[in-house]
Amino acid sequence: MMNMTQPIKHRSWAEPYKIKMVELLQMTTREQRERAIKEAGYNTFLLKSEDVYIDLLTDSGTSAMSDRQWAGMMLGDEAYAGSKNFYHMENVIQNYYGYKHVIPTHQGRGAENIISKVMIKPGDIIPGNMYFTTTRLHQELAGGTFKDIIIDEAHDPDNLFPFKGNCDLGKLEDVIKKYGADKVPYVCIATSVNMAGGQPISIENLKAVRALCDKYGIKIIHDMTRVAENAFFIKQREAGYANKSVAEIVKEICSYTDGATMSAKKDALVNIGGFLATNDDHVYEEASNLIVVYEGLHTYGGMAGRDMEALAIGIVESVDDNHISARIGQVEYLGQKLIDMGVPIVQPIGGHGIFLNAKKFLPHIPQTSYPAQTLAAELYIDSGVRTMERGIVSAGRNKETGENYLPELELVRLTIPRRVYTQAHMDVVAESVEAVYLERDKIKGLEMIFEPKYLRFFMAKFEKLK
Ligand code: F0G
């Protein structure tokens, strides 16, 4: 016999769960969808959910809870004060993330409001690794100004750098020197940077940011909405982490930061909820004062007891290696299909969704005619798949000049809810994107006919250009 090394066969991932209950979906005709999207002002946020077939608008609050989480819902202690579910949740957050103080909020932006009010003074500067819509707005409403310090690679959809969520330390230090360290209350570090396409930050970069912040006495606040997905990419890509568990990496990430805001509706596998965490006693005291004004008592902060119980269980499930590898495996499956079809998407493939590069998909539509908004509407018309614009509409206007931001990234996000859709759904989505891609020359842009003052992407209305 010849002494040959056998090639290692690729082994597939599969979901580490089976389906116990299903939700029936509505199928619609193309005519119905054309009417529905017109009535919605060509804004997928304004569609009725029952008119949607596969809903990839967001991964926020759209996860399927496990049987254990549903069982936990029955253990809700709906006391106004000191619910036992709060103490369970607090204990899990302290153990899994390592933060000292925990305050529940109704969702992520509740925590952003409180942390901004507590830590930002008018005139302050908040550097961050790319903006997020609600995070930046709360910083601005507190009188601060956001400064983008993400690496340049993050703004290039085709750059294959494995950690496009990294901070540019030169940019960060320039901001600190220009405005003075006393004007920078904290650096806002997101894990799995949403607007960059779900791109991770490396531990190496995070440690360097920590060292720089220590040099100037500046705190780090962690937007940990998708921290487990970031940790999985570190395990896959960063030297020295292959044999660590996602849970260990998550805890290490948190250890380089001073506090966090969390939208538990994403990674943590619940339909509603969030929290603010801090290691700083003074920040905790101030935040507790404000939480009773804006959210609720500090032991429920806008969450029902049952929801805190589901969250406590969801956090533990979210850092399980098998869960996260299937979750990211599914996103990769869809992304690879689209790459094979020649469709321009942001690469590397991110954690929570696939981001179509609308500038390349519809090069004949200028950014001021909303190519990503247009593409999201066309995908819905083709198949009933609902996606979200992440481009010029989401970016909004400069708060000082009133000018539209013109972001480099003009994207359509196909966000994958956790534990909800099957591989066959992903096939249908890919085929729909391909069908629209093949007809792309015929697509015309949009004109905005209604623009809300804040976070305009949620409720803006459009008309088709003739
Ligand atoms: N930070 C990040 C990175 C987010 O993605 C979100 C929400 C928030 C904060 C705010 O949290 O919605 O619970 O108030 N992102 C959703 C999305 C809306 O679709 O990406 P929230």
Image (cartoon, helix red, strand yellow):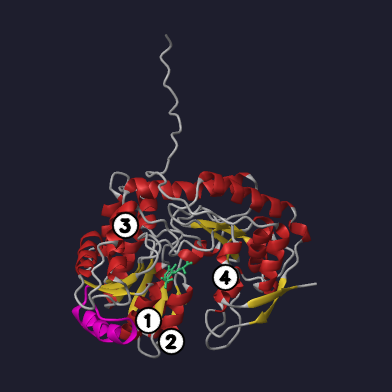
Pointer 1 or 3: first along the chain = 3
Q: Is residue 296 magenta?
A: yes
Q: Where is residue 420? Give x, y as percent.
A: 46, 53
Instruction: Report which residue position mark 1 lands on.
Output: 113
**Crowd rating for badge 1 (residues with CA inside 10 Å; few <14, some 14–19, many 20+):** many
Separation (CA) of disc 1 from disc 3:
28 Å
Q: In the image, which disc is placed on residue 69?
A: 3
Pointer 3 or 2: first along the chain = 3
- Residue at 27% of width from left, 63% of height from top? 309
| Side of 418 relative to 399 (left or right) | left
Residue furthest top in the image = 1
Q: Where is residue 2? Give x, y as percent.
A: 43, 11
Foreground pick, 86 / 70? 70
Report helix, strand or loop for mark 1.
helix
| Side of 151 relative to 364 (left or right) | left
Q: Is residue 88 above or below residue 106?
A: above
Kind of residue sitting beneath label 2: Leu
Q: In the image, which disc is placed on residue 45?
A: 4
User: Is residue 404 among the parts visible in the rendering?
Assistant: yes
Question: Where are the magenta residues, as a range?
Answer: 279-298
